[in-house]
Image: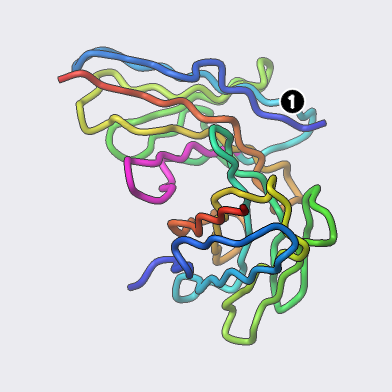
Amino acid sequence: AQSVSQHNHHVILSEAASLELGCNYSYGGTVNLFWYVQYPGQHLQLLLKYFSGDPLVKGIKGFEAEFIKSKFSFNLRKPSVQWSDTAEYFCAVAPSGTYKYIFGTGTRLKVLA
Amino acid sequence: DAGVTQSPTHLIKTRGQQVTLRCSPKSGHDTVSWYQQALGQGPQFIFQYYEEEERQRGNFPDRFSGHQFPNYSSELNVNALLLGDSALYLCASSPDGNIQYFGAGTRLSVL
């Protein structure tokens, strides 16, 4: 069955620390990849997406992600986190030719001021 | 420009009852998807509607049904509610079926 794994369920960092959140998926074909963020009390918002081309994609608020096809991974990174990055982060995969997103279980990030 | 709006925000029902949740997509979006998010889990795809037809369905029983209206708004209906149906129900709209924009959700509690 197709699935998405987010290995870190809870992450606590101090401001200015670097962030990397892991995302792996199980699907052998072509996929579209997404990272969404949910700030406290708000709805899911798109951080960045990958459809094709350059495997290093840049999103909003200084986030970036790298697609490594051989590792079925799409890890999210930010060089220096801020207190305002405290949120829950979801990785999602959409197998090509389908319209459904398969989400990971999410990673709760807490940034200490 | 209003985003995806869902109503109601919260709902309490008892086992065996039926519920209808509503969603208005972002302006210019013609595709609506529904997801169920249980506590501590990521959203799970229920189905997607396009041109008033169910285009794709996830692994949910027939108790879950939907409808899309000519103005692209959508309803999610759940019959014979079970305790396990308690969750946050998310609606997402899309201009092309690929990038989805989510609403704030309807929190359903089944007692």
Residue placed most toward the observer, A11 or A20: A11
Q: Position of residue A31 (x, y in %)?
A: 68, 38
Specify whether A41 is left or right of A1: left
Image point (78%, 33%), residue name: A29
Asked which quadrant contains residue B43, the reply is top right
Q: Which is the main secondary structure of the residues drawn in magenta?
A: strand
Q: Position of residue A94 (x, y in %)?
A: 67, 43
* Mark 1, other Cα within 10 Å: few <14 / some 14–19 / many ≥20: some
Q: Position of residue B32 (x, y in %)?
A: 61, 66
Quarter containing the N terminus of chain B: bottom left
Tag 1, which chain? A
Image point (39%, 66%), residue name: B3
Residue placed most toward the observer, B52 or A109: A109
Image point (44%, 75%), residue name: B27
Residue placed most toward the observer, B111 or A19: B111
Look at label 1 and name its amino acid: Ser
Asked which quadrant contains residue B16, the reply is bottom right
Image point (20%, 27%), residue name: A83
Q: Which residue is mark 1?
A: A26
Q: Position of residue B108 (x, y in %)?
A: 56, 56
Which residue is farthest bottom?
A: B70
In the image, the segment drawn in magenta is A33-47
User: Magenta span has A38?
Assistant: yes
| Colour pattern of the rendering | rainbow
